[in-house]
Image: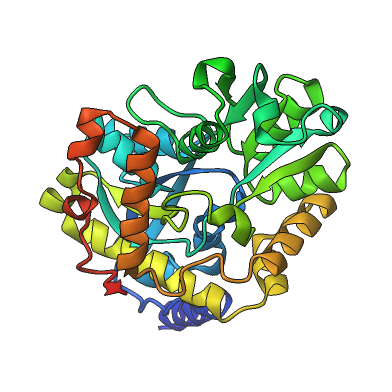
Amino acid sequence: MRRSIALTIAGILVSALTGLAPISPGIVAEPAMRLRVSVPGPRNLSYLPIDLISKIGADRAEGAEVRIQYVGGGSLALQNVVLKNADFAVAGVPAMLSQQANGEKVVLLAAVDDLPVYVLMVRADLKKQVTNISDLKGRVIGVNSGSLTSKTTSQQLAELLLKSEGVPLDAVRIIPVGQSWSEQSSVINSGTVDAIMGSEPYASRLLAQNKVYYLMNQADPSVVKKIPGSGFLYAALATRPEVLEREPQKAGKMVAIVRRTLQWIATHTPEQIVGALEIRDAEEKAALLASLRKYTRLYSPDGRLSNNQLKESELFFLQAAGNNPAARRIRLESMVYDKWAGRKD
């Protein structure tokens, strides 16, 4: 009797600390469903909702445990899904279209971002030599890491910009540089690259250190007008068709977790979001906070897929793909499964 009471009290104490419902003595709790997610990072601004999942308990609230595999680019995340190293990936939709065009199918489930944020940054010591995109001819440009079967959104955007300014792609050298602070800062500091089609908050952090200057910021309305399909859906949740066919409950649960996280973000301040991440490095913490304040409509509020963003994504991909016959046959709508996330105009 005393032991039963003690177990009950212990269960109540645990629930008070974790926010989970207490488990009655003698009842064996069902093991949490494990969901493996591959994503660029860590703490890349566009993919931050995935970093937050376990911090705010969004997975536990859905009876699951999300395990994250960090990679150097969305294409690598998608490759992990295809190779069954992960159940889900979060990546740019243009990268998903590239994967599909190369014969490896993926399914788009939900939106994570509402605004694509890319910055073309150049090493500070080149400020007098590189004043516009055409000056990048003969230079080394870093992009997010891709795979043999998928070209990253970062690379597609870099190539589109170069072509729009009359710079032949064979007149530059494009190399993968990853998608984390350590990777992007190291290639700038070492002089390995002259420019990066980079990510936030890394770009702002390097700018604050006077290591780079901006040649293009996608958040600038004047830049957006120059890029066909510039309103594309960037970070989004995807899986392989096999998961939907054999384990649809996994997909439904993962979408629910992402939506719960996005709804939490929408009701919390940048200070609360950064606080939940428990970042120890003061400089990293400050850069992330500044970026969250700067890009106020970065994330989707609910995970719903926007019809307009899907159209923009397809347009952007087709512009970047040029005359590639396989790419021309791809239609994004055939890759969408919106049962759990829903749609909006």
Left/right placement of residue 47 relative to residue 246 reads: right
Tell me residue 172's x, y (percent): 59, 19
For the image, the number of numbered tags is: 0
Residue 132 found in image quarter: top right
Nearer to the camera, 63 or 231: 231
Tell me residue 96's x, y (percent): 33, 42
Q: Residue at x 20, y 55 (%)?
A: 333
Nearer to the camera, 246 or 127: 127
Q: Is residue 219 visible?
A: no
Q: Residue at x 36, y 38 (%)?
A: 78
Q: Residue at x 62, y 50 (%)?
A: 43
Q: Is residue 304 visible?
A: yes
Tell me residue 288's x, y (percent): 72, 57
Q: Is residue 176 above or below residue 232?
A: above
Spot the residue most to the left.
245
Residue 286 found in image quarter: bottom right
Residue 271 found in image quarter: bottom right
Quadrant (top left/top right/bottom left/bottom right) for the C terminus: bottom left
Q: Residue at x 36, y 52 (%)?
A: 313
Tell me residue 17's x, y (percent): 58, 75
